[in-house]
């Protein structure tokens, strides 16, 4: 581990600077998530459409 023997180094000052930096620069908010319901409904719609087409094809074969 390195030792810093610099007499001009003020550990409390650097902590204060860090705290001020954290206070002035808050973390960005998380982006809102896309809703999953439209994707699920689209998948169900595609599955029903394919099912109907297959059923019609089998019925008139």
Image (cartoon, rainbow, N blue to C red):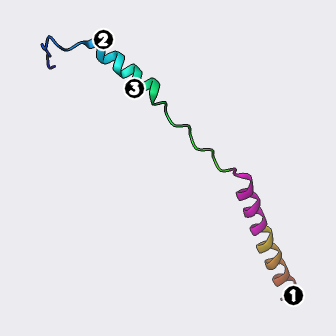
**Residue 5 vs residue 33: left or right?**
left
Q: Identify the residue at image location x=14%, y=16%.
A: 3
- x%, y% of residue 25? 45, 30
Total numbered badges shown on the rendered structure: 3
Residue at (79, 72) in percent of width and height? 49
Instruction: Report the Cα–Cα distance between label 2 and label 3.
Output: 14 Å
Quarter of the figure with the C terminus: bottom right
Is 26 displayed left or right of 14 in the figure? right
Figure quadrant of residue 18: top left
**Residue 39 within the segment the image draws in magenta:** yes
Magenta segment main secondary structure: helix
Q: Report which residue position mark 3 lands on.
A: 21
Determine the secondary structure under disc 3: helix
Task: Tell me, yes or no, whether the two marked residues, 2 and 3, touch with CB atoms within 8 Å.
Answer: no
Q: Residues within 10 Å of mark 3 (few under 14, many from 20)?
A: few
- Mark on residue 12? 2
Residue 39, image quadrant: bottom right
């Amino acid at each position: 581990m390195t030792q810093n023997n610099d007499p001009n180094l003020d550990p409390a000052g650097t902590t204060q600077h860090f705290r001020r930096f954290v206070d002035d620069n808050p973390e960005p908010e998380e982006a809102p998530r896309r809703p999953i319901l439209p994707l699920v409904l689209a998948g169900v719609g595609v599955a029903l459409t394919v099912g109907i087409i297959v059923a019609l094809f089998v019925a008139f074969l």
